Image (cartoon, grey):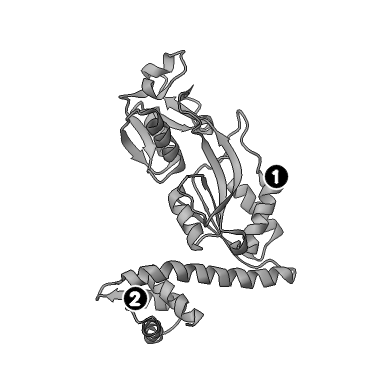
Amino acid sequence: MELRHLQHFVAVAEDQHFTRAAERLMVSQSGLSASIRALERELRAPLFVRTTRRVTLTEAGRALLAEAERILAQVRAAHEAVAAVQGVLRGTLALGTEQCIAGVHVARLLAAFRGRHPDVEIRLRQAGSGALAEEVAAGRLDLAFAYRTRADSDQLRSVALTSEPMTVLCHPGHRLASTSAVLTPDDLAGEVFVDFHPDWGPRRTTDAAFAATGVRRTVALEVNDVHSLLDLVDENLGIAVVPRHFRHKRPSLTALPLKGTGETEYETVALLPPDRATSPAARALVTLLETGDEAGGLAPPQEGSQPS
């Protein structure tokens, strides 16, 4: 089995199309098809279901894809490790992050990293924590800033960023805004909730907190970006339970503490593959992260700060 066969297979799986994959790889379509056929002969199994419009993975293809991505990621890391020993950090840093992650200023961190390692190409992907964890485990991302979940597999390790309590945000005219009592999930029963997609860290935290107390809630307004969530709450269309630092993004909203959720907190981490599979670029970024260099803006958010 040749590495180029795996590279060709992964490209076709990603593009779901032989012509597009061939163009991206800058090889002929006939050469790409021959490469896939050679791989199928060696494995004695069809890897794709071919139609006139696209190709899809067979069960054997899906099984191979995860392993092929890991192998290619390890080969890339090996090349980069040799370059690092020679004194030059090269290659690619593939980073994932949730929106408005607490504990790190991502843009400032990447600017500091680029200043130290200009020969490394930086690629950034924004998504929910669940998808990011899967991509780190599969080798498609070198690391990700995300919410820690119990579902994180033994294929991942983490570096703590920060943790913070969850806060209720509501319109100043909402009935809850005038309360002087500390809120519990029971107090929010029957409310209209604005929240993120279930893959997002804040949504996972809130779902876990309410499930732990046995309070059922319905998310009527589901969004995929922070500012849309704040806009909906600002129009008094619902309330939101979010990490505490979100309150600084919309001072016009009323922020209320939420208790009775046990030890459930919004805990953010840097997710990485096992140490042996961590790329030199990811190691360098983590080193920068752990030094707390002020130029990187890495300190956890303080009261009154406005993290990204």
Quadrant in the rendering for residue 161: top right
Q: In the rendering, which numbered label is found on residue 235?
A: none
Q: Residues within 10 Å of mark 2 (few under 14, many from 20)?
A: many
**Residue 67, x across and y down, in percent:** 46, 69
In the visual, does 138 lie left or right of 45?
Answer: right
Direction right: furthest residue: 87
Q: Amino acid at mark 2?
A: Leu
For the residue labelled by badge 1, is the local secondary structure a helix, a strand or a loop?
loop
**Badge 1: residue crowd in 10 Å (few <14, some 14–19, many ≥20):** some
* Mark 2 / mark 1, whichever is N-terminal: 2
Image coordinates of residue 86 in percent, x first then y, are: 74, 72
Name the residue tied to disc 2.
47
Q: Nearer the viewer, residue 217 or 19?
A: 217
**Number of marks:** 2
Task: Determine the image quadrant of residue 89.
Answer: bottom right
Image vertical order of residue 305 relative to residue 154, above or below:
above
For the point 37% across and 17% down, the residue is 175
User: Looking at numbered disc 1 in the image, what kind of residue is underneath it?
Assistant: Gly
Q: Of 219 and 3, which appears nearest the observer?
A: 3
Q: Residue 263: x percent and y percent? A: 51, 31
For residue 118, above or below residue 111: below
Q: Which residue is mark 1?
A: 292
Rendered position, 4 above or below 224: below
